[in-house]
Image (spheres, grey):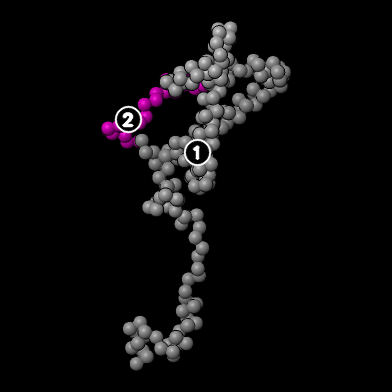
Amino acid sequence: MALEEEKRGGYTAGSVSSSSNTDLEQAPPPRLPDEKDAIPEGDETMTLDSKREGLMVNPFENDANGEIEYRTLTWLNAGFLLIAETISLGILSLPAVVASMGFVPGCILIVFFGILTTYTGYVTYQVKIAFPGIHNFADAGLFFFGRWFKEVSEAAQIILLVFIMSAHILTFSIMLNVLTNHGTCTIVFTVIGMVVSMIL
């Protein structure tokens, strides 16, 4: 009778006492959830690993026949943008920095940061080639360090862009002050620079 109950899924006192040790030995140990099992907030369908796997594939690789063309920046336009960025906030402010710091320390720092920039650019290139789905620092933060670093990277990128735009507007207002011999209030020139930057 006890054997029949065990076959049906029921248990008697004898069956429980005789099989308790065996069941405990065969039961898998409890496993704590790790980062692979964590589901990012607001996304209950994709795990962190699945998002990382998505960054291995370039989402714009086969968009030639798509209705919307997302990649419109050519190499020539990218070159002009990089040159303008380097000249506006880099080269134009370099003489004043070297004058206040000194010629020898200025040259040493120029060479040092030139090497550092070249190296970081090469590392960024290697990451892009190895992981085509990574398009920004937030994607890189998600892939290498998890969701919390993605949030930090997004905030840092937004703050960087805001400060870069602010530096452009400030430089524009100083330039107009010099060209017009302080023809009007600096705030007016700042607003003009903001409008021009938003249009461009």
Residue at point 39%, 25% (across, down): 73
Where residue 163 sits, quadrant-wise, is top right
Position above or below: 11 against 191: below
Position above or below: 102 against 116: above
Q: Secondary structure at mark 2?
A: loop
- The mark found on residue 71 in the picture is none
- Residue at the spot of label 1: 154
Which of the marked residues, 2 or 1, is nearer the chain's N terminus? 2
- The mark found on residue 69 in the picture is 2
Amino acid tagged 2: Glu
Q: Is residue 161 visible?
A: yes
Where residue 78 sits, quadrant-wise, is top left
Residue at point 42%, 52% (across, down): 47
Front residue of 154/192: it is 192
Residue at point 49%, 78% (across, down): 24
Location of the N terminus (image quadrant): bottom left
Amino acid tagged 1: Glu
Magenta residues span 61-87
**How dense is the environment of label 1, judged by Cα within 10 Å: few (below 14), some, or many (20 and up)?**
some
Q: Magenta stretch: residue 120 in it? A: no
Q: Secondary structure at mark 1?
A: helix
Residue 61 point in image, percent of width and height: 35, 36
**How dense is the environment of label 2, judged by Cα within 10 Å: few (below 14), some, or many (20 and up)?**
few
Which residue is at the far bottom? 1
Residue 103 point in image, percent of width and height: 71, 17
Residue 174 point in image, percent of width and height: 57, 15
Between marks 2 and 1, how big is the CA–CA gap? 24 Å
Position above or below: 196 against 46: above
Location of the C terminus (image quadrant): top left
Where residue 184 sits, quadrant-wise, is top right
Q: Magenta stretch: residue 81 in it? A: yes
